[in-house]
Image (cartoon, grey):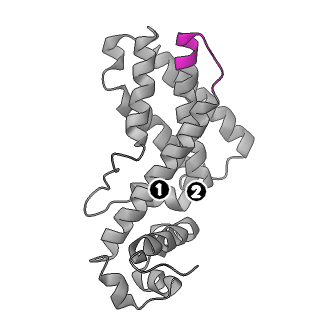
Amino acid sequence: MGSYHHGNLRPALVEAAVGLAQASGPEGVVLREVARQTGVSHNAAYRHFADRDELLSEVALAAMQQLSAAMSVELAGVVETEPAARAVARLRATGRAYVHFALAQPGLFDVAFAGHRSPPEVAPEAADPYALLGLVLDELALAGAVSAGRREGAEVLCWSAVHGFAVLHLHGPLRDVPAQEREDSLEQLLDQIQRGLV
């Protein structure tokens, strides 16, 4: 870990904690190890974080921001121009990006959704994956691809489906499914979500 400038210890601690989370998930985020990697005493770390839960909440926020960034990249790749087809393609891209992030960054994904004393609040300037999904669903409604009745509360339906899929393939009975079979199943899931809304 590189040195930090005076006054920037807190971001350096969070950066080290994010690295530990990427490698080992929530269990890997230990304040003493974060302090050691940053080159300060554990007492110095405790001056910035009351306890491990507070640090984990910061890591969860960073994970949510990375998830949002991954979703935004996938959305930017949608090439459809007809409004309804574009909105459907963007909905599918959102779900695909969510699952792919979970599989590529299992440690961060686990921290993002692990139970903490207080759930992380995404800073206003940062993308919020739930809000991003809401915007994509609003696009579906504006394009006339989904009725107002089906649009209402659709975030929960969509999020639950892709989250459950991701967890089953990360930690559940589907974790040993071959990659291509998993991708085919993901596309089938996105078909079902699409049919449930459009």
Residue at the limit of the structure toward the front, as seen here = 6
Q: Foreground: 124 or 64?
A: 124
Q: Which residues are magenta?
A: 78-87
Q: Is residue 8 magenta?
A: no
Report the number of discs. Answer: 2
2 vs 1, front mark: 1
As helix, strand or loop, the secondary structure at mark 2 comes to loop
Q: Would residue 2 be visible to someone looking at this image?
A: yes
| Residue drawn 39% across the image and 21% down it | 138
Left or right of 43? Residue 24 is: right
* Residue 142: quarter of image: top left
Q: CA distance from mark 2 to mark 1?
A: 9 Å
Q: Which residue is mark 2?
A: 105
Query: Around disc 1, counting alpha carbons within 10 Å, would you say few (fewer than 14), some (14 to 19), or many (20 or more)?
Result: many
Left or right of 38? Residue 53 is: left
Q: Foreground: 4 or 21?
A: 4
| Residue drawn 29% across the image and 56% down it | 119
Asked if marks 2 and 1 touch (Cβ < 8 Å), the reply is yes
Q: Which residue is mark 1?
A: 63
| Residue drawn 49% across the image and 24% down it | 193
Residue 102: x, y in percent?
55, 50
**Mark found first going from the N terminus, 2 or 1:** 1
**Label of residue 160 in the image:** none
At label 2, the amino acid type is Gln
Which part of the image, by quadrant, shows the N terminus? bottom right
* Residue 182: quarter of image: top right
| Residue drawn 45% across the image and 58% down it | 62
At label 1, the amino acid type is Ala
Query: Around disc 2, counting alpha carbons within 10 Å, would you say few (fewer than 14), some (14 to 19), or many (20 or more)?
Result: some
